[in-house]
Image (spheres, rainbow, N blue to C red):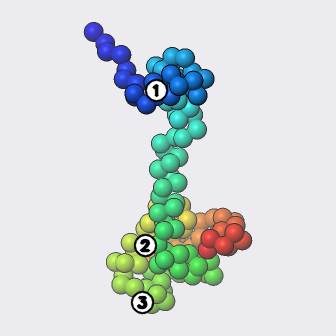
Amino acid sequence: MMSKPRVSKRLNRLIKSGICPAEDALKYADELKQLADKVAHVEAADKQHRFFKALADKTRLRILRLLGVREMCVCEVMVALGLTQPTASHHLGILENSGLVKDRKEGKWVFYSIADRKLIENMHEVGIL
């Protein structure tokens, strides 16, 4: 026997108050879930989370500003910002995972650059970077 999905007491109270135009709490809950699936995708939120996490650190913001000037290898970022190799690589990995920077290998060297120059320019224009 399949049980009915639980609808929160608050949603039932909202509907009974007359403020909400819905009549059936279960149907309305289903509509709300469909709306969330349509406009608030988990995958999109995950991508946005990675993007904003990458911007939520002053070292990563400084790295983006450096890479906005020119391509750099990890050792150049280390020296410029006084970081250890693991710390620089960690921050560059987060920036790369978020799609803000890309890497290019040349022999044993890995060079990093801005992945989307237009995005960075827009961020400069609105004062984010």
Name the residue tied to disc 1.
13
Closer to the chain start, of discs 1 and 3, is: 1
Which element carries disc 3, helix, strand or loop?
A: loop
Query: Which residue is at 31% across, 12% downward?
Result: 2
- Does residue 107 appear in the picture of this structure? no
* Nearest to viewer (mark 1 / mark 3): 1
Amino acid at the residue labelled 1:
Arg
Query: Which residue is at 43% across, 68% downward?
Result: 93
Closer to the chain start, of discs 2 and 1, is: 1
- Figure check: 72 above or below 54: below
* Nearest to viewer (mark 2 / mark 1): 1
Using the numbered discs, state the Cα–Cα distance from disc 2 to disc 1 in whole angstroms. Answer: 48 Å
Query: Which residue is at 36% across, 16% downward?
Result: 4
Which element carries disc 1, helix, strand or loop?
A: helix
- Does residue 74 appear in the picture of this structure? yes
- Figure check: 105 above or below 16: below
Using the numbered discs, state the Cα–Cα distance from disc 3 to disc 2 in whole angstroms. Answer: 13 Å
- Figure check: 119 above or below 28: below
The residue lying furthest to the top in this view is 1
Amino acid at the residue labelled 2:
His
Name the residue tied to disc 2.
91
| Front-most of residues 5 and 20 | 20
Expressed as whole percent of the image width and height from the top left, the position of residue 25 reads 48, 20
Q: Are marks 2 and 1 in contact (CB under 8 Å)?
A: no
Name the residue tied to disc 3.
82
